[in-house]
Amino acid sequence: MKALLIGGTGTISTAVTRQLAERGDELVLLNRGSRNDGLPDGVRVIQADINDEERVVRLLGDQTFDVVADFIAYRTEHVERDFRLFAGRTKQYMFISSASVYQTPPADYRITEGTPLSNPMWEYSRNKIACEEYLVRQYRENGFPVTIVRPSHTYGERNIPLGVHGKKGTWQVVKRMLEGKPVIIHGDGTSLWTMTHNSDFAKGFIGLMGNKRVIGEAVHITSDETLTWNQIYEIIADALGVKLNAVHIASEFLAAANPPMDLRGPLLGDKAQSVVFDNSKLKRLVPGFTATIRFDQGVRQSVKYILEHPELQVEDPEFDAWCDRVIAAMEAAARNI
């Protein structure tokens, strides 16, 4: 199989790149080259900004592909560009959407691919929905061979997934845990969530690549393991070898408390909702697929890797100070009642 990945070095796509390279597929990445250190042997890189269409057309020449997968398309102009570039050049175009496109708040916590698409709280999700609608129209009207993939909260060795964090990532929350400082958990921590290791995602994704049965289809890829946020934070604290000092604060309060980052979309429009994913469609299309890395196993790998790589320990003093102010405000309110 000859595959072109647009991006190929992010949290999700890195695992896909590794596993395709291990299989010996002919793999080409198209990206700007900013994170290509350590790519597997045999992976070819076309270094370009995908938005520079003239340069991309010139560099692609007359190449065709069995699969083109775009991991960095977020708005309709991105998929419109991809249609212009790859119509007639690939047997399958895979668009990486998001599980946050599903109805929010959900009418049923059990999510299937038939769950309505609607998220009034997050522009990111509405943009992904618009991308899906455009691509489905191109499939129906022009035969563009699209497959839509919807990942949920996916993590790898370079990141520790959490619910509430700042613009610079989750390290500051981890640092607070290590220092014994109180850590904010949204709501009462009992809402249900699914974490998926990127290597498990990659197995499902590669199973869909070159699969003619998924042309014109949308499929989500997640683990079957469902955890509460309290369990997630406890598992991370255990991996760090510390006792969790949790403070529960209503999601609506957090979003309204002048946070230094957007919480209305990622929190109210996503992580504050209880969701349980039904992966039966994926398992029909990719026989034998199962997610095998439990969260406690995967996050231990992440903790070990990040603690061994100081360059990933990006501090966020603005978010840290905000946490202290919010927690102090809640404590003062309790005292004053």
Image: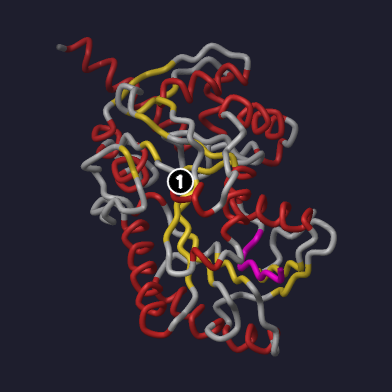
Residue 198: say if magenta: no
Q: Quadrant of residue 60?
A: bottom right
Instruction: Count numbered badges in the picture.
Output: 1
Q: Position of residue 113 (x, y in %)?
A: 36, 52
Q: Position of residue 279 (x, y in %)?
A: 45, 44
Residue 7: say if magenta: yes
Q: Residue at coordinates 37% horizontally, 19% vertically from top-left?
A: 247
Tag 1 residue: 152
> Which quarter of the figure is the N terminus placed in?
bottom right
At numbered mark 1, what does the secondary structure look like: helix, strand or loop? loop
Q: Position of residue 139 (x, y in %)?
A: 41, 77
Is residue 132 or residue 237 the one in the foreground? 132
The part of the chain drawn in magenta is: 1-8
Q: Quadrant of residue 10?
A: bottom right
Is residue 141 or residue 77 the one in the foreground? 141
Q: Amino acid at mark 1?
A: Ser
Q: Residue at coordinates 38% horizontally, 62% vertically from top-left?
A: 128
Extreme residue in the left direction: 337
